[in-house]
């Protein structure tokens, strides 16, 4: 959600190797990144930071596992988004865009209930506009015949009706 | 003739034996009279101390590499180490950013390229064009001054520019700019600075 943008980012891991010249930090061993409501988990994470203090992180999944992304969404008391990828997630804290690579899946949740679910080789999610795009190749472009995209979009219950 | 020869050989032998024994006896006497000095090696109290000192390490090209100053430097002949109270270590080499480290006490090993700093260790390395300012706090820090490496197995808190890094098993190589933490790493990057392009919102 919007409020996350102005909060500090915290990273926990087993090991860390920082290169002062390239100013790149590599965390390894059950890496957990938290920033407000945003939580990302990975086996390895490479982080660089620009002078203004924005972080650019690439989270790598453990072999056979997934790297995961979970963040609260605005516009509701308990709206969440959960994403995962088999290869990696690239996260840019300036544009707040998360890119999920290979066997990617993004779910929108209302509390525990999954309202939307999208699967594909590559998914890009912009948490500012809460807009996500899906492609069937891990490079981020769609190629005909490269693979199926599956999307389940639940009908939006009209706010007024609910009350 | 033969018995005369044998007589001379025997006399020679007796003479050299007496000579050897005599010198051994003399050495023993000298050693015993020297008394305390020769068994200096196993005494553990200091044999000298220097107050308000500054020790500057110079490279073979005559260039100052680092200085160690402090309230008091005490030498222990037992293991030939120097104990320093309130040490202040400064790196003086131009190619490296100036670094300044202090602690409550320190000991300098025999080959004094090793400096163990104990209790309230605080290190401050100035920022440079391409490196952020680094500050380090720990209970123990080992400085390998010749290889420009510092390490500690104690928990450490490092402030690097705006981020704070905590962990254990730190090794930092100032020459290559590498900094590793081997255990329970916890890093906090502060939020992006307000003026950086946020006004657009």
Image (cartoon, coloured by chain):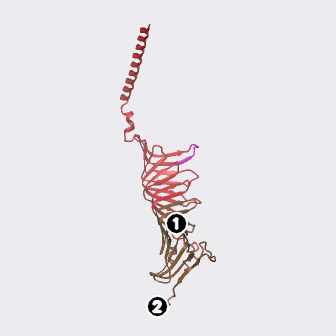
Q: Relative to residue A17, is residue A128 depicted above or below?
A: below
* Image position, residue B3 (x, y; %): 41, 9
Mark 1 crowdedness (10 Å alpha carbons): few <14, some 14-19, many ≥20: many
Along the viewing direction, whichever of B199 and A65 lies nearer the viewer: A65
Segment colored magenta: B60-66
- What residue sits right under mark 1 in the picture? A45
Which chain contains the residue that carries disc 2? Answer: A
SS state under label 1: strand
Residue B31 can be seen in this image: yes
* Image position, residue A118 (x, y; %): 54, 79
SS state under label 2: helix
Q: Relative to residue A154, is residue A61 depicted above or below?
A: above
Q: Total number of numbered labels? A: 2
- What residue sits right under mark 2 in the picture? A162
Shown colour of chain A: brown
Spatial distance from mark 2 to mark 1, Cα to Cα? 42 Å
Q: Residue at x 43, y 9 (%)?
A: B2
Name the residue at the bottom extreme: A161
Q: Are marks 2 and 1 on the same chain?
A: yes
Labels 2 and 1: the sequence-earlier one:
1
Along the viewing direction, whichever of B137 and B7 lies nearer the viewer: B7
Q: What chain is the red one? A: B
* Image position, residue B169 (x, y; %): 45, 57
């Amino acid at each position: 959600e919007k409020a996350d943008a102005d909060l500090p980012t915290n990273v926990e891991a087993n090991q860390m190797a920082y290169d002062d010249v390239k100013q790149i930090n590599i965390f390894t061993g059950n890496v957990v990144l938290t920033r407000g409501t945003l939580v990302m988990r990975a086996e390895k994470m490479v982080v660089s930071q620009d002078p203004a203090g924005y972080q650019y992180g690439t989270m790598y999944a453990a072999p056979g596992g997934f790297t995961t992304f979970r963040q609260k969404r605005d516009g509701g008391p308990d709206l969440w988004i959960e994403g995962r990828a088999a290869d990696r997630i690239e996260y840019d804290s300036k544009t707040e865009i998360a890119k999920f690579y290979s066997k990617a899946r993004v779910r929108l949740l209302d509390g525990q209930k999954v309202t939307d679910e999208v699967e594909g080789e590559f998914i890009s999610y912009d948490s500012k506009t809460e807009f996500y795009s899906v492609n069937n190749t891990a490079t981020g472009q769609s190629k005909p015949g490269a693979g199926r995209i599956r999307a389940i979009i639940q009908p939006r219950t009209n706010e007024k009706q609910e009350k | 003739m033969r018995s005369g020869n044998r007589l001379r050989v025997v006399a020679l032998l007796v003479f050299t034996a007496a000579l050897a024994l005599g010198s051994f006896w003399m050495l023993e006497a000298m050693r015993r009279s020297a008394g305390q000095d020769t068994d200096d090696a196993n005494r553990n109290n200091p044999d000298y101390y220097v107050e308000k000192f500054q020790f500057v390490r110079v490279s073979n090209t005559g260039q100052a590499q680092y200085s160690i100053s402090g309230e008091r430097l005490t030498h222990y002949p037992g293991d030939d180490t120097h104990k320093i109270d309130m040490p202040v270590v400064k790196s003086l080499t131009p190619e490296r950013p100036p670094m300044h480290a202090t602690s409550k006490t320190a000991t300098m090993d025999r080959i004094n390229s090793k400096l163990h700093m104990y209790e309230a260790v605080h290190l401050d390395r100035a920022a440079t064009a391409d490196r952020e300012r680094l500050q380090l706090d720990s209970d123990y820090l080992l400085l390998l001054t010749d290889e420009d490496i510092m390490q500690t197995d104690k928990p450490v808190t490092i402030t690097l520019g705006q981020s704070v890094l905590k962990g254990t098993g730190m090794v930092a190589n100032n020459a290559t700019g590498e900094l590793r933490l081997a255990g329970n790493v916890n890093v906090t990057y502060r939020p992006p600075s307000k003026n950086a392009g946020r006004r657009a919102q």
